[in-house]
Image: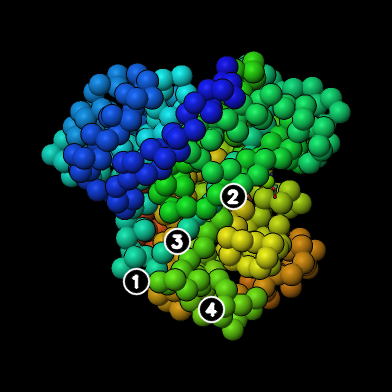
Amino acid sequence: MLTAERVDAQADVHAWSMDAARTDPTLSPLPEGDAVDRLEQQLRTDGVRWIIGTATNAAGLVLAKSIPAPRLTAFVRSGCGLSPAHNAYGVDGSVVDAASVPHVGDLRLRLDPSGVRMIGDGIAMGPTDTFFQDGTPDPACPRVVLAKAVRDLAEQGLHAMVGHEVEFVLVRPDGSLLDPGNWRPYGANALLGQEELVLDLLAGFERAGIGVEQVHAEYGEAQFEVSLGPDDPIRSADALITARVLIVRTARRHGLMASFSPLPEVGKVGNGAHQHLSLRRGNEPLFSGGDGPHGLTGEGAHAIAGLVRGLPQAQAVLAGSALSGARLQPGGWSGAYACWGRENREAAVRFVTDGMSNPHGANVEVKMIDASANPYLATASLLGLALDGIRRRLPLPAEVTTDPADLSDTDRVHAGVTRLASDQAAMVDALESSEEMRRILGDPVVTAVLAVRRHEQVLFAGMPPEGVAAALRLAWS
Ligand code: GLU
Ligand code: MG
């Protein structure tokens, strides 16, 4: 178990995990030898024996290859081998439809030394990018795709920051639900009921150099949230993956497990994976300082228009699992309607203005995303849709200032507010026929996402939602 003394002893770990080996976050295929040498030295000093490199696939599963620490350079330069089929391992652990995802061939998972973080007990972990054997980047690699979305923005002089919220429900190791006891949503004693676990978690985040903004007991029974600070989109997604691993690792040490499933139990509150996004041109924010509604600049308004318009097409990526539709019900603050509104928790795009209560500045919180999404692909989708809105100068739709469920059908049609799909087949069809999403993510990614989502459709056809929720409770853990 982690102790305060050990955290103190490693107080400078933050420095190396964030800075020592930083390379270009928009993907530098072969990092400088110096960066690798510095990291190697630091890992040795910190007693790291084992390095795990993660690859998150189209079904949102966090996969990994690992090496003994002395083989760091090989992991960074030549990579570890993995079948191209890995991108389409399904939520049940089986390999999906061989026709859409090749089973022959080998990919190289190359560790990005800039993302390596200490997760404790001699173990370090970092993200990988996928390359073909000849050294060209794999267009189906989610991290490569996000790097491209970041570059597309940069070519237009735009930069993004992203912050992730991590909701999870603590369950027993076999996935069964805990007795809620005296649970109260946002309860102080609900939070303190897991005080040892939370303290260990905070120690783990600190050691890994992951900035935590806040921790609270959420609305659902045994549900908690950790909100992460904003950062460059790639580093943020990397931090999110490490955060999920740390949450599971810590829960396990306390005899529990953590479920990130969109809906751990039917009829209860779901888990969101909300992403906060802000954009700036040079140093000028797009979501504040302008003369549009709530200080929106013209480009900020177009970006929100692009997001709201594109969410239904991106839903299979953002919240497209067999359970995601059941989470996206009105009244659960999951953002079940494709619309936007200031501080509107029922809108898929909640606008958060700047001001003294918001030191990070104005941003949009895309609430409909859940943890069945690959976070790299989810962010790439948001960036691509926002950029599309800016390029096409899409007009900002009317702001929704009330609960969209309270509007009459006519008013919703008038305001252009649509309900996001709750049927997985509809999400899959919308992605399949979206030229825009194919442009943003590329055909190989769309093919992989369609394959894993269709696999779920077949797997759970005819199964009552309670069965699906139980089957998938630990799928993303
Ligand atoms: N648990 C809700 C969801 O499924 C979100 C609650 C909140 O706004 O924090 O997205
Ligand atoms: Mg929350």
204 relative to 21 in the view: left or right: right
**Is the CB atom of the residue marked by disc 4 within 8 angstroms of ligand 1's nearest atom?**
no
- Residue named by callout 2: 274
Q: Quadrant of the N terminus?
A: top right
Residue beneath label 3, please? 160
Q: Earlier in the sequence, mark 2 or mark 4?
A: 2
Place of residue 45 in the rendered image (x, y in percent of width and height, measured from the top left): 34, 25
**Residue plotted at (53% across, 59% down):** 277
Q: CA distance from mark 3 to mark 4?
A: 15 Å
Which mark is first along the chain, 4 or 1? 1
The mark nearer the N terminus, 3 or 4, is 3
Mark 2 element type: loop
Is disc 2 in contact with disc 4, using a CB cutoff of under 8 Å? no
Q: Nearer the viewer, residue 25 or 455?
A: 25
How packed is label 4: few (under 14 Cα within 10 Å), some, or many (20 or more)? some
Residue at image coords 68%, 76%: 414
Dot 4 lies on which element? loop
Q: Residue at x 52, y 63 (%)?
A: 278
Upstream in sequence: badge 1 or badge 2: 1
Residue extending farthest to the bottom is 291
> In terms of image quadrants, where is residue 174?
top right
Amino acid type, residue under disc 1 in the picture: Gln
Residue 297, labelled with which disc?
Answer: 4
Label 1: which residue?
156
